[in-house]
Amino acid sequence: MEGMSWNDVIGHEWAVEMLKSGMENGRVGHAYLITGPDHIGKTTLARTFAMALNCEEADEGKRPCGACRSCRLIAADRHPDIRLVAPEVSGRGKLTLKIDTIRQLQQNLNLSAYEAKVKVAILRRFDAATQGAANAFLKTLEEPPKNVILVLTANDADTLLPTISSRCRTVNLRPLPTELIQQSLAIRRQVKEEDAHLLAHLADGRLGWAVQASQDAAILDERRTHLDTLYD
């Protein structure tokens, strides 16, 4: 992910402008909730926001630069002050964000930053949090540590406790147009035109899914085999 910038947040320009405007005008919130279907770009937006907040580029208009030490570490999920927390997959395939994970994060957030301008915690799929985990995290939302920004992602804000969502600035990402996904695959990922066209139509507005599928030949091969069986 080296070289990431706001330009890599495809199709959500309005969300980018909102976050950039907040930074430029000194109105960055202490907590954000980014919602939308799986693989639509929620984590990419959150990670790029964290990069912009901590970029070392002198020109504010060029942040995140994607090239400085801070940007490269965040893009690789290796920055000591930018925590990416994800739910665990249980034996039955269910996603669960446990209270122990939240407590460990809270301990980390209360420590001084090693090198970041702003500590950022990205909590993926917070809708998978247990009731205990959600209630424990509520205390952090109500009294956030100094110089810490919290970014939650979820498929739908309505699946969260109202006391959680009401304390966050909500950014609702919408499915992308098929044409935009096809263009992104063909131009940015050099996917063959035929495959880009097919994946864009199968993606249901989810660029992240289309990108993953373009890198896994088995997905299209399986679909072709299935169609051959149907029409055999």
Image (cartoon, rainbow, N blue to C red):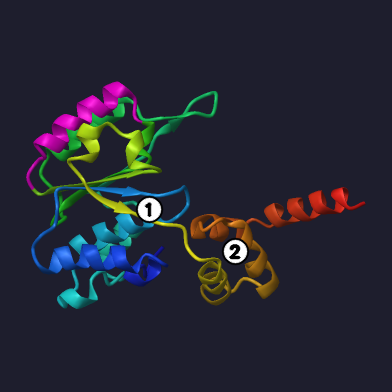
Q: Quadrant of the N terminus?
A: bottom left
Residue 166 in picture, x, y percent from top left: 20, 40
User: Does 156 appear in magenta?
Assistant: no
Residue at disc 1, secondary structure: helix
Residue 51 in the figure: left or right of residue 2: left
User: Does 144 sit above or below residue 189?
Assistant: above
Q: Which residue is mark 2?
A: 200
- Nearest to the observer: residue 78 or residue 134: 134
- Nearest to the observer: residue 146 or residue 21: 21
Q: Quadrant of residue 198?
A: bottom right
Q: Quadrant of residue 129?
A: top left
Q: Quadrant of residue 210?
A: bottom right
Task: State whether residue 215 appears in this view.
Answer: no
Q: Which residue is mark 1?
A: 42
Q: Residue at x 32, y 63 (%)?
A: 72
Q: Which residues are magenta?
A: 129-146
